[in-house]
Image (cartoon, grey):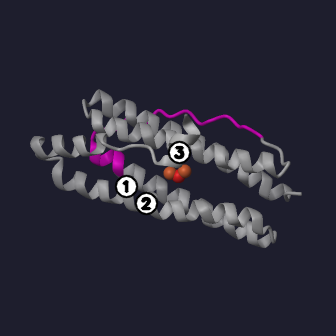
Amino acid sequence: MLDKQLEQALNDQINFEFYSSYLYLNMSAQLAAMNLDGAAHWMRVQAQEEVTHAMKIYDFLIDRDAEVCLQNIETIGEKYNSLVEIYEVTVGHERKVTCRFNDLIDLALEKRDHVTNSLLQWFISEQIEEEANVRTILEKAKMLSSSPDSLYLLDKELGARVASAPIAEKIN
Ligand code: FEO
């Protein structure tokens, strides 16, 4: 039986993952409006990835015979002015996600729930990659976005992103 406090915290994390998806989809729409179609595609894939994160926790709660409690998703109204600004926000957001998983792991260990801890270890490892990827893109955006030719090439590179295999399997 899953501890109630842990169950609530995991439901909150499902909500935060869907919020992350909204955040990135809003960024994708704004990048498309800036005619940065490659970056818009990258963010759209990221938004899809966040949904798979939410569903991974959702499936875990179902498997543990715990209650899934879907909550309202906060409305996203932020406007952005540049590719650099968008990736600055993205880096900050992913750092926040990592902090949340650290806190969740602390709680799982406090409750001596090693099965939940095992799930959360997957997420915390994933965060290393997520943070590194967005940091790299931010640094490239800072270096290249003042020149239209370089920005075009960066946008093209971002447009080549494909969803990773397990995510593609889950979406399709
Ligand atoms: Fe679900 Fe980008 O963390």
Q: Which residue is mark 1?
A: 134
Q: Which residues are magenta?
A: 69-87
Quadrant the C terminus occupies: top right
Q: Is mark 1 within 8 Å of ligand 1?
A: no
Residue in front for this viewpoint, 119 or 90: 119
Q: Image quadrant of residue 132?
A: bottom left
Q: Is residue 69 left or right of residue 76?
A: right
Q: Which residue is mark 3?
A: 167
**Mark 1 touching mark 2, by CB under 8 A?**
yes
Q: Which mark is residue 131?
A: 2
In this rendering, the count of numbered labels is: 3
Residue in front for this viewpoint, 21 or 38: 38
Q: Is residue 39 left or right of residue 47?
A: left
Q: Image quadrant of residue 55?
A: top right
**Element under disc 1:** helix
Residue type indicated by callout 3: Ile
Asked whether residue 13 is drawn in magenta, I would say: no
User: Is residue 19 visible to the viewer in this orientation of the structure?
Assistant: no
Cα–Cα gap, marks 1 and 2 = 5 Å
Q: Position of residue 3 (x, y in %)?
A: 85, 59
Q: Which mark is residue 22?
A: none
Asked whether residue 78 is drawn in magenta, I would say: yes
Q: Residue at x 40, y 37 (%)?
A: 27
Residue type indicated by callout 1: Val
Q: Earlier in the sequence, mark 1 or mark 3?
A: 1
Q: Main secondary structure of the magenta part?
A: loop
Q: Position of residue 90 (x, y in %)?
A: 41, 50
Q: Position of residue 110 (x, y in %)?
A: 78, 72
Of all residues shown, which one is farthest toward the top? 33
Cα–Cα gap, marks 3 and 2 = 18 Å
Q: Is residue 171 left or right of residue 35?
A: right
